Structures are given as structure tokens and as C-alpha cells.
Amino acid sequence: LQYQFPEDFWWGSATSATQIEGAANEGGKGKNIWDHWFEIEPNRFFDHVGPQETSDFYHRYQEDIQLMKKIGHNTHRLSISWSRLIPSGRGEVNPEAVEFYQHVIDDMLANDIDPFVNLYHFDMPIALQNEGGWESRDVVDAYVAYAKEAFRLFGNRVRKWFTFNEPIVPVENGYLYDAHYPNVVDAKRAVQVAYHTAIASAKAIAAFREMNIDQGKIGIILNLTPSYPRSSDPSDLRASRIADLFFNRSFLDPSVLGAYPQELINIIRENELLPQVQEGDGELLRSNTVDILGVNYYQPRRVKAKEYVPNPYSPFMPEWYFDHYQMPGRKMNIYRGWEIYEKGIYDILMNLKENYGNIESFISENGMGVQGEHRFQEKGEIQDDYRIDFIREHLKWVHQAIQEGSHVKGYHMWSFMDNWSWSNAYKNRYGFVSVDVETQERTLKKSAHWFQKVSEQNGF
Ligand code: BGP
């Protein structure tokens, strides 16, 4: 093999509760912001498809776990739906949910798949969103109570826990760029939401350690987008440094180093956006950094110096400090409209090695969304050679990082199966397993067979 990976490398994939479970009104589940948003504004969702059924993992998990096993997974990351476990967000635990997650976890373990469990993947219970969601410190406490409940219920079997998936995304999309509920544009509220999320994560980590969960590790999953400047001109470099502060270091630094970068604090202060804090918060962040970091990587961010001075009367946006830049000749995933830049994954891992204590990490999402993927169907199977290329080229860079001493322990593809995605519903397909939305029939794609071999051989 030309690319041999270390022994015990984690080969698997990721999913999230809202995107795959379906059964949104079953099994005693409460409503989350997605159920609610679809109810009041179905037009916002591609093809008017909401999170009600999705890929029906709730009823078909046994079949799906068999497929995971078949394609060689030794690990898989899923999320718990907060509003399924605790329907009103706080208080009463739903026994049907306990039973469901217990079965899923046990079934994975019985098939030698180590379940990695994430507690929050964009899915705030609506009852708590109505109290202000992450803007409210009481909601932080409700989250910590939920986390403790999950540790208590499943901590004897789950060895890898994650407090959040991509915590910057609800901040950006919910409070700046109009794509998640409550879809407002208000930087001050965005900063408060980001801050409370970081506090919630630190508090859950503190609780986890107090509960002394047997052999378990706890971390966070961040979507890191290397921020590349157009040129080495100081104004472009500054633009890229500031974009990096907003979109990467805003969570990376508190999570791994236990403190916010001073330059970010200065920018937030200059713009009168400082959040409300409580005494002891600084110490809380400092002493509750993560054991392990999940890295989601899809595409880089390319920026250049701002061309025009922003209108000072317009609401604050991070883009006051930089413009996006489309590098000529860049490689594109034309089926999703995202740039493909494989070396970015290596740059992230080297940055973690050099500036973040070479923290233990793994690639927790990387993958290729394809609109209209059924057109690649041939001989009863999706011939997704483009996805094989995509994964292979990224893995080569992961391998390179390992050669150079990176502490990266695994690779999880997004996603195990085609699933419902936020406002895009079923537009972009990501799975190793294709799902017929009408019949819920599952079929392996060509990439699944390829990945099975890679995991079995531990390389390619
Ligand atoms: C990540 C999310 C996933 C998934 C993926 C693909 O940001 O963690 O939940 O949706 O992106 O993105 P999309 O479905 O928008 O193409």
C-alpha cells in the first residue's frame, strides 16, 4: 500500500439526529426549531420538504448499522436529539428516547462500531428557543442538565463525547446571514449566542469530568476553514487574519487553549458588541478545555482586503473587515458550488500541531454534496467516482500530516447515508448509501465499496 494509516485508525462516517432520524412527531419527541420553522415557513425549505421523515433511521437503525458494518466502519458519529430525550428542553426525560438511543448504541457496540456521541447539532428545543435560546444563560444551564442526563444514561458505553457540532454555524446562520431560525441580523446577539455556547461547552466538560466518566474523552467538533489571503500584501494578510479570528479562532481558542484571542476581543469591544459575562467565566473556560477535537472540513475561505469602506450606519458584519475572493482557476465541486482544496485539510492539521499543542484530533466531517446525483445511477448503483477521488485526495493529505507528526486519529466522511439537510432538504446527496426518499430503500454507492476496502486494508 502506498498510503498506510496507523493501527487503530478510526474509519467511519457522521450523521446527525435531525437529519436522519425522522419520526419527528413520534416516540414522545418534542419540537425543535426545525420542526417549528417548517411548520410556520415551509416555503423556506427546498421542495417544501421538512424534517418529519428524513431517512427514517428511527425505525431502520438496525438495517443501517448492518450497512455501516458492511462498509467497514469501526466508528460512527451520531447525535442525540435534545428534544427527543427531554421534550421540553428541561425536566422530564422521555423513556422512549432512552430506549431508542440505548438500542442504537448497543447495536453499534455489538457490531464493533464505536459510537461517538454529539450532544448538539443545530437542534434547539423550541420551548427553550422561545426563552431566547443561546442568548439566555438559563438555557445554558438547561443544556448542562441535558448533557449530564446523557452522560448518566449512556456514559458507561460511550467513550467519545462531543459538546457541539460546528457551534459557529447557528451563530452565523441564525443571527447574521439569515439561514437558521430565528434568522435575524444582529451582531450583538450573535456574539452573545457564541459566547454562551462556549460557556455551555465548558460547563458540560466540567460536569463530565466531575462525573468521572469511565475512560471517556470529551471534545468539540469545529468546522475549520483555513483563511487564505489573495496575496502577501499586508492589507490582504490582515483581512485573512481577521476572517480567521471570526470564523475559526472564535471557538478554537477557547475550546483548546481556554481563552479568546486578544485581537478578537479588541474588535468586538471597538464595535460595542461585548457580551454579558458572569464572574468566574474566564476561569471556567481556562480549566475546561477539550480532550479531543473533531475537524469538519469542506472548503477554504479565500479573502482579500476590503475594497470599500463599509457604511457605518449599516448593521455590523464580519465582512466589514474583508471581502471574499474567488481564486481564478480554483477547483470546484460544480454539483454543490463549493471549492475543493484538498491541501486545506493538511494546513489545518499542521496549524493544530504547531499552535494548539498538537491536540488529539480526527476528521469528523469531509465529503461531497451532489445535486441531482441520481443521474449517475448505472447498473443499479450510483457510480460516484468523483466522491472516491474527493475522499482519496483528502486522505493523502491526512496521511502526509501524520508523517509530519500530526495527532490525527481518524477520518469520518459526511455522511453515512443521504440525508435531509437544513434548508436544502434532500437537494445535495452526501452518503455512502443512497436513500430513495419515496420508498426509503437503501443502496450502497460505488464509494461505499471503495471505502470498505480502504478501511479493511487500513490504507490504499
Ligand atoms: C455541515 C453540517 C452537516 C451537513 C454538512 C453539509 O456543516 O455539520 O450537518 O449538513 O455541513 O452541508 P449541506 O447539507 O448544507 O450541503
Image (tube, rainbow, N blue to C red):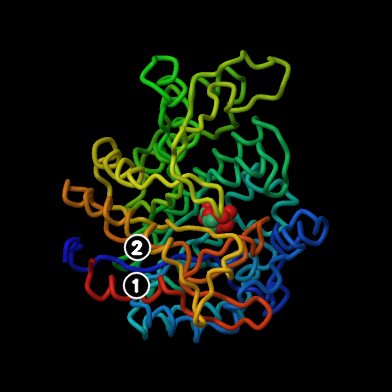
Label 2, on which residue? 212
Q: Which residue is mark 1?
A: 450
Q: Is residue 376 above or below residue 175?
A: below
Q: Are marks 2 and 1 in contact (CB under 8 Å)?
A: no
Label 1 sits on a secondary structure element that is: helix
Viewed as shown, does residue 21 lie left or right of 48?
A: left
Residue lying farthest to the right in this orientation: 40
The answer to whether mark 2 is within 8 Å of ligand 1 is no
Q: Quadrant of the C terminus?
A: bottom left
Neighbour class for label 1 at 10 Å: few (<14), some, many (≥20)?
Answer: some
Q: Amino acid at mark 2?
A: Asn
Residue 373 shows in the view: yes
Above-or-below relation of 439 to 312: below
Residue 292 on image: x %, y %: 33, 53
Element at label 2: loop
The crowding category of the residue bearing disc 2, from other C-alpha atoms within 10 Å (few below 14, some 14 to 19, many at least 20), is few
Q: Quadrant of residue 39?
A: bottom right
